[in-house]
Image: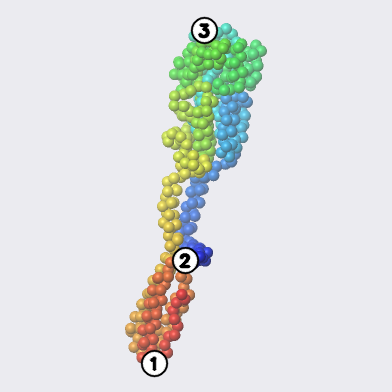
Amino acid sequence: MDKPDVPNPRIEGYIWRHAQDEIRALLLFVRHQWYIIFVLVLAIGLMVHQLKPFPPATIRMATGQPDSTQDVLGKKYQERFASAGVSIDLVSSKGTADSLALLKAGKVDVALSQGGLEIDKASGVVSLGSVGYQPLWLFHTDADFTGDDLFEYLRGKRVYVGVIGSGTRVVVDALFKEAGYAGQPIFKEESSMLAKDSVDALLSGKLDAVFMVAGYDSGLAQALFTNPSVKILSFPIADALARRISYIETVSIPRGAISLSPVRPKSDIKMVATTTTLLARADLHHAIQNLFLAASEDIYNSGLFFFDRPGGFPAFTDKTTPRSEVAEKYYLRGGAPFFNEYVPYWLASFIDLAWFSLLTLFLVIYPIFRMLPAYRKYIFDVFATQLYFEIYHIDQDLYRAHSADALAALRPKIAAISHKVQTVWTPMGTKESYNFVVAALARLIRRVNERFVKMGLEKIESTPGHH
């Protein structure tokens, strides 16, 4: 049995005709319903202007002194931001207070600082939260300290307390103020050198002790606590100090945590600690803030920080610093924006911030979008309805026409409507409606011609329609 001959369906012309109809319908929509397009474009423009979805490609970050905890941490952020396509320019400073000053002056966008600094709400600086502990180390080369009065132990010694503007100086001053020694130096204070120079001074015997606020990973701190000749003083009154100073907490180093053989330290060491705090300009782009918080969580989970905290980091631990609204939302939902794993970080942040506006806009645009494919039919239906009304009115005029002149007056009206029918745009999918119009006009012409014949008038010869 022969196979039936199946013709090759040539659909190219059909697709091209369909595309032409859609384009023409879209152009007509824009032409006649331009006010809808204008309102939508205006709404989208205002939303983009207000919410600023596109973050900067480069930001500046103050990281304190070289080899400090902030410097090490800043490089970690730099690595993680690079993978997101954002560059961080690291800016060195004298310390946390100096970093804060740079931030307030607008010379940097973000600063790694520490808890306890006085920050006014009017300064335009907000906290993204604490990202790790920074203990106050007291390194010395004397015999092990076994007493209770830390301040008497330091009396008369040569002690480094950090340069003015450093985080170390802020915490040391707070401790001595709490003990009643503010403005009453009980030791020979050294504050003219940088922290890295104090390490050499202690090892060479030019200093008896060095105060240093630094994380366990700090290059300067490690240069001292790994040196066998240097000891770490355990604060006998750490708990009392933590109760008296709001931004101070206690941390400890277990026996043997630094070295198992030989065992170092030889006993548990208790210290007071502040936190490394991530400060930012209040107007820092919301996507960049979310990126910092996500990076902080990633860095903490990677095990960079030696000192742990129940609940982990990042977290709000300093009650005195104004908080970022973006950070508060981050902690409230328990992490990065929902779409962070599926779309670029800036888009996830934008959706998280503008979801209600986007939903509202979608509810407005969706019906219009659904209407566009049928707009060509809608246009023809409106036109066909108008033609039906015109045919109906001519039919009424025909009923009322009782003279040859009255009938002759119908001829130009019928010619006009015939021209419209023959030249009207009939997009795909409107053939049935068009045929109804043609049939209605044909019936009208037939009835008019019947009356024309009776009155001795010349018949209308034109045949409506172009299909």
- Which one is earlier in the sequence, the residue at label 2 or at label 1? 2
- Which one is earlier in the sequence, the residue at label 3 or at label 2? 2
In this rendered view, identify the residue nearer to me: 375 or 215. 375
Residue 2 drawn above or below residue 393? above
Numbered badge on residue 211: none
Q: Quadrant of the N terminus?
A: bottom left
Q: Secondary structure at mark 1?
A: loop
Residue behind mark 2: 2
Residue 83 drawn above or below residue 147? below
Count residues near mark 1 (Cα–Cα under 10 Å), then give few for <14, some for 14-19, many for 20+: few
Marks 1/3: CA–CA distance: 134 Å
Residue behind mark 3: 146
| Location of residue 119 in the rendering, given as x and y in whole percent from the top left corner | 51, 30
Q: Identify the image quadrant of residue 455.
A: bottom left
Numbered badge on residue 456: 1
- Report the amino acid beneath label 3: Thr
| Location of residue 345 in the rendering, given as x and y in whole percent from the top left corner | 52, 40
- Report the amino acid beneath label 2: Asp
| Location of residue 234 in the rendering, given as x and y in whole percent from the top left corner | 52, 13
- Report the amino acid beneath label 1: Gly
Mark 2 or mark 1: which is in front? 2
Q: Secondary structure at mark 2?
A: loop
At 47% from the left edge and 19% from the top edge, which residue is drawn? 250
In this rendered view, identify the residue nearer to me: 443 or 154. 443
Q: Secondary structure at mark 3?
A: loop
Count residues near mark 2 (Cα–Cα under 10 Å), then give few for <14, some for 14-19, many for 20+: few
Residue 274, visible in the rendered structure: no
Count residues near mark 3 (Cα–Cα under 10 Å), then give few for <14, some for 14-19, many for 20+: few
